Image (cartoon, rainbow, N blue to C red):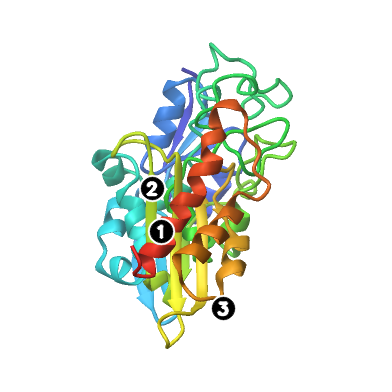
Amino acid sequence: MRDFDYARPASLAEARRFAAEPDAMLLAGGTTLLDLAKCGVAAPAKVIDITHLEGLDMITFGAAGVHIGALAKMSHVAADAVIRENFPAVSEALWQAASAQLRNMATIGGNLLQRTRCAYFRDPLAFPACNKRDPGSGCAALGGVTRNHAVLGTSKVCIAANPGDLAVALTAFDAVVHLGERRIAVDDFFLLPGMTPEREHALEPGEVITAVTIPASVPARRSTYLKVRDRQSYEFAAASAAVGIELEPDGKTIRDLRVALGGVATKPWRARDVEKALIGKLLEPKAVREASLLAMTGALAQGDNHYKIDLAPRVVTRAILKVGGLA
């Protein structure tokens, strides 16, 4: 392990100055940093401990929505009564993520910055070719075992799937990431790999996530997070969907619909084609099944992960029918 300096900034401003230094990494819950260091991917020159900064772990709710501090623990947010009532998909996504021990340590800000679980990315000794770790070195996943890799948002240099659960729910409900003075939609915070897969987030040097805000809405209040995986717990999604719905007064016509996918794309994936196909239509199983197929528009399989193209629309269908009261 590389020797590193340790800093404990006295203020957020000082933390930002440290974060602007080359090869500096923030320490909050530490679950991601420790994991990456152990597998030889992360080797920071400086670790910046922000765990003690006051005011960054608060959860506040108002008429406009909820403000969640970046240092709030995953378990605290998941269990919060206001979150559970007004943003059930967010609570469910957090409860289904990681283990209880990790949820008690990991923070909301750190969760958004977690790296891919691509086995090739996380094993630099066995697989030195990885464009995320070493731009231009190649992608060992291409032509390899790809069962857990992405089918949406891929490029010719990277097919690694985004591992998040929380980020999928945040994407569905138009959440915003606070980076000090700058605000950025969660959907824009996560970047497609393109030709620069090493850059996964829209953070600029010296920026620190301070909070996430989620606007209040009827779909957010009537929502769910459905996660399908190889085993019931401690596993990343093969395919997941965060869905929220608002019906017209007749209780049958869809007024508003939010759909986002996890486990199948290189970033949390907003399924806007599905939303557009169903808004204004009657909520009925046949129409939902047909529209859900649009979630895979543009999907490209790489051998072993072809099953995701069939699985994801079924997950979307189940989630929509569940929140619509038909399942």
As helix, strand or loop, the secondary structure at mark 3 comes to loop
> Would you identify the image quadrant in which residue 23 lies?
top right
Is 44 left or right of 155, judged from the image as shown? left
- CA gap between label 3 and label 1 equals 18 Å
> Which residue carries the number 1 mark?
319
Residue 257 image position (x, y, % from top left): 51, 70
Q: What residue type is labelled 1?
A: Ala
> Which residue carries the number 3 mark?
280
Q: Which amino acid does label 2 sit on?
A: Lys
Residue 96 image position (x, y, % from top left): 32, 47
Is the C-beta separation of discs 2 and 1 under 8 Å?
A: no
Q: Residue at x 42, y 70 (%)?
A: 220
- CA gap between label 3 and label 2 equals 27 Å
As helix, strand or loop, the secondary structure at mark 2 comes to strand
Q: Which mark is residue 227?
A: 2
Decide: few, some or many residues near mark 3? Use Cα within 10 Å; few <14, some 14-19, many ≥20: some
Residue 286 image position (x, y, % from top left): 49, 63
For discs 3 and 2, the disc positioned in front in the rendered view: 3
